[in-house]
Image: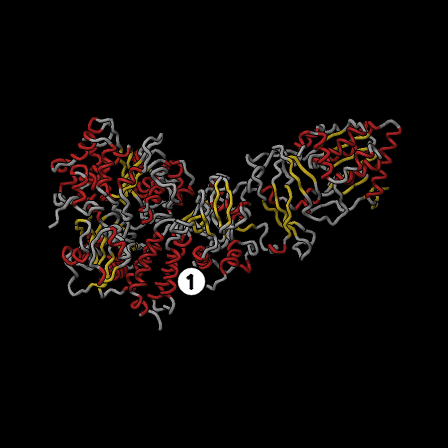
Amino acid sequence: MEEKVLTQKFDLRSLFEIGSYLQQGGYKAVEKALLGMKPAEVMEEVKKASLRGRGGAGFPAGVKWSFVPQKVDKPKYLCVNADEGEPGTFKDRYIMGHNPHLLLEGIIIASYAVGIHSAFIYIRGEYEAIAQRLEGAIAEAYKKAYLGKNILGTNFDLEVVVHRGAGAYICGEETALLESLEGKRGHPRLKPPFPASIGLFQCPTVINNVETLSNVPFIILNGAEWFLKKGLPKDGGTRLFGVSGMVKKPGIYELPLGTNLKKIIFEYAGGMREGKRLKAVIPGGMSAPILRADEIDLPMDFDSLVGANSMLGSAAIIVIDQETSILEVLKAVVKFYSHESCGQCTPCRIGTSWINKIVERIGHGDGEKDDIDTIIRLASNIKGKTLCPLGDAAAMPILSVCQKFRGELEGYLPR
Amino acid sequence: MSPEYSDELRKKIDEVVGRYPKKEAALLPVLHLVQGEVGCISAEEEKFVAQILGLKPMKVREVVTFYTMITRQPLGKYHIQVCSNLSCTLLGAGRLIDYLKQKLGIGIGETRPDKKFTLSVVECLGACEQAPCMMVNFDYYGQLDKSRIDQILDSLT
Amino acid sequence: MAKIFIDHQAIEVSDGLTVLRAAEEAGIHIPHFCYHPAFVPEGSCRMCLVEIEGLPKLELSCSTVVKEGMKVHTKSAKVVEARQGVLEFLLAEHPLDCPICDKAGECQLQDYYEEYGLFESQFKESKQKREKKVRISKNLILDRERCILCTRCVRFLNEITRTEDAGVLNRGIHSEISIYDSDLIENNYSGNLAELCPVGAITDADFRFKTRAWFLERKESICPLCGRGCNIVIDSHPGFPRVNMTQRVYRIRARKNPDVNAHWICDFGRYSYAYMDEKRQEKLVMKKGGRDMGLSWDKTVIMLAEKIKGLLFMKKLSRIAVILNTWLSNEELFLADRIFRNELHLENIFVVDPPQGKTDGFLLTNERTPNKRGLQEIGLPASAPDLKELAEKTDLLLIFGSFLVDEFNVTDIKNAFDKIGTKALFASHKSSLDSLVDIIIPTLLIAEKSGTLTNIQGKVQAFSPALDFGGEGLPEWRALLDLAKELKINYKYFWQLASPELVLQQMGKEIPFFIK
């Protein structure tokens, strides 16, 4: 059995209460950072640990923190991306539900490293129960002076606010998240400028995913080298792989980066459900290009998946069986992106809807010979041409399904 | 006739607004609070919220119509939101949606005449390990099948 | 300064310019919809994507700032494909309204399709059905099916008028532009929205269905309705079948001038063009024994000169009075000053203007004439006459403009005029003054003649004829010059001032303000 890092104490049902958490050694990382390290040292340690973002983009967290200007006469902000909208992904819910204080520790240490005194947790509106649990943990942390003014008697202050979203996948995109936090529609912004210089309320801002921040306490307690050993030389740590779909044991599996995908599905997640055979796997959340059953023998790390023309993304593994029509898969994909498109830019607004209309028509039995070619052409006109990554997130799975399962799709069209 | 908003609601709103460096940033949290009390955000609520936050009602409506969890129409006592995304579809969400339509006697997006249930179809709820799932108001229910659904509906009084 | 290459052409541009602006300066047009120089770049239409060497993806030219050595390609295969992609998306959900859409002929979607598209539609689905006649202001109608969501209208109302009247509702393909319920847009700049809209989504009821854009002749002019002097374009019908046979002007549009009116004109200026065609003085008439007798200008100027010479001979020059106005051009006011004050030493020179209005805090000024500043710089007195006094001491009254009826009531004017021997009226429009004067000389509008005006900021702006006048009108500068020549005063001086341009040159020599 692999040694767990993040989820090592998650079996303890009372872990979300600060009393239990402290008993288990909680908030020692905060003490070590604030009382024993300088902010620059904390940042350096996280950089050395090669902690890559676990939201989907995989950008190194320490490097992102270093982009924020040190001396600036504006407040700096930390936004915790708890929007978790990527289909197939449920790891952040898992972390926040079981161990909200772990996330708070990560928030405190990250804020200390960058010089941030105000943090917002942007949590999707559907996670109301989790938001309440977070708010409970925050209240406990304030009481024990791990939050608020003069934390642990130092001159470091930090306020944390839980901010609920209201049902928009696009708000998981960092600049749309900022717009939404500012009380507006979740319309992504043009980059540059980047949030590290112009972010929330036009101030320097760091946006990090829940799982990313939840790793920070372990890096501080055990050091960067230890963290790297848990994963790969260039990608430290473990990932919370979320397996769902047609497997016997769907759920969260914390495993080192680099663990083989086939192993995750057939050993850890118990393999296919009774009588089902594997058809395809989406390895990193719906935005990750699909893999055929014969393509899953590979290590789950950033580079290997790029090499397989897919991506690690949110490490959400969706297992699809032979009996499921690939058309149903495509339908779910195009329906999702056309529903979630914010509507700002032409290719995504019209393109995702057009493709959705074609797939619906095929589903009703009115497909035409050149429909797949049209879908591929339209998706190619979305890819790389949109204002934000949602366009690519839509185009890539659509293209991969059409290319890898073309034969099956054409079975729905007239000869 | 302008509707009355309770003092308690106003207090909660003030508290929430105070958490943000700019009033306008509190728009979504305030909309959640108002919707929680009133049931929906109609034009009256838009103007009420606009006035508190120093915004034009147009700006409030822009936000209200962007987010799926903010509703302009009142909903049934129990808003049944069934996930129709991939993992849930793989595990039979489609059949369950049909079952709910038939059992409740309403279509997607509709409210039963007795105003007890509204049925909606939503995207990924982030509970894929329990697929197929649904959310009733804010409560998650997973590993659904027809008998589980029957049980749940019976328990909703 | 930075040296960059656009389509292999080397150009020097100022630092901080975007690629799109730099290309524009070099005469290369990069197609776009949502970009507008008056607003912060939006980057949502995706039409302006270009290829920049060294960068993997196509980049937005509207928001990418030039860097030294940058190599941009605006016509490469990748760019052409991307442009066609955007066009295809827009046209897929666009209604086939061209035959009934006012924007046809000046529509960016049409124009870009003709230049960069020319492909067959592959869209086999049903287009989104949306409302097609949403009234958003007194004059403007929004057609949501035609809308391409460039959001220029929303941004104009946010960033320029700051009235925040419009916004985008819903999400994704269901996004739509809207006002708040029936809170119509009610500001003095709403008309700019129809111009701003790159397609026929926002149309102006004032122009709706009246004509086709390609029938219009577009000429530059200056709006004379207030002291701002906004630069305009007058769209007129040169002769083709017209809605109303006497209507020439169909529309006024804004013309860009960064120093005066940026990209805008106010609704007051935009919609008040009917006066150019209505109630015009068309014939030069002299009233004799209760009848109107037609007369030529040549004979009239001789007659006027005779009257003046007569009074001069009798040493009664002081019995001549002149009423001017500040619709007159710089050249006309200068000639009036030199002739009446300098040469004839008249003292009774007055100015009667239409009443002031309220400024709107942006372009529209209190003063409702275009050349009050010009009058000040030339140094003419600016007060109105006392009618009773005027009546007692005047034998010959030359009136420029019919604004007396705005300042005084007709009975008082009649009583005064009954005591004045000869009243000659130079006016462009019919008014109740007509029956009270002896000679009516029709004059031309600013839109019909040449000259310069000085706006409230002190900017001297030239204008030239944008319309032909079918009647017998003549410009006041010619009337004054002919009078001077007929009077044979300072022959050499006035003879060489043969055109407004030459008059302006002379003004530059005599008044420092008017040095070019």
Q: Is residue A392 left or right of residue C145?
A: left
Q: Residue at x 37, y 58 (%)?
A: A379
Q: Nearer the viewer, residue B155 or C36?
A: C36
Name the image colouring: secondary structure
Few, some or many residues within 10 Å of mark 1 (<14, 14–19, 20+): few
Q: Residue at x 43, y 56 (%)?
A: C78
Q: Is residue C473 left or right of residue A297?
A: right
Q: Nearer the viewer, residue C369 or B114?
A: C369
Q: Is residue B117 left or right of residue A265?
A: right
Q: Quadrant of residue A339?
A: bottom left
Q: Residue at x 17, y 38 (%)?
A: A223
Residue B157: in sight, yes or no? no
Q: Secondary structure under badge 1? A: loop
Image quadrant for the C terminus of chain C? top right
Q: Residue furthest bottom?
A: A415
**Residue ID for mark 1:** C126
| Residue A29 placement (x, y as % from top left) | 17, 35
Q: Quadrant of residue A370?
A: bottom left
Q: What residue type is disc 1 on? A: Ser
> Above or below — where is B32 with respect to A364?
above
| Residue C423 placement (x, y as % from top left) | 80, 36
Chain under callout 1: C
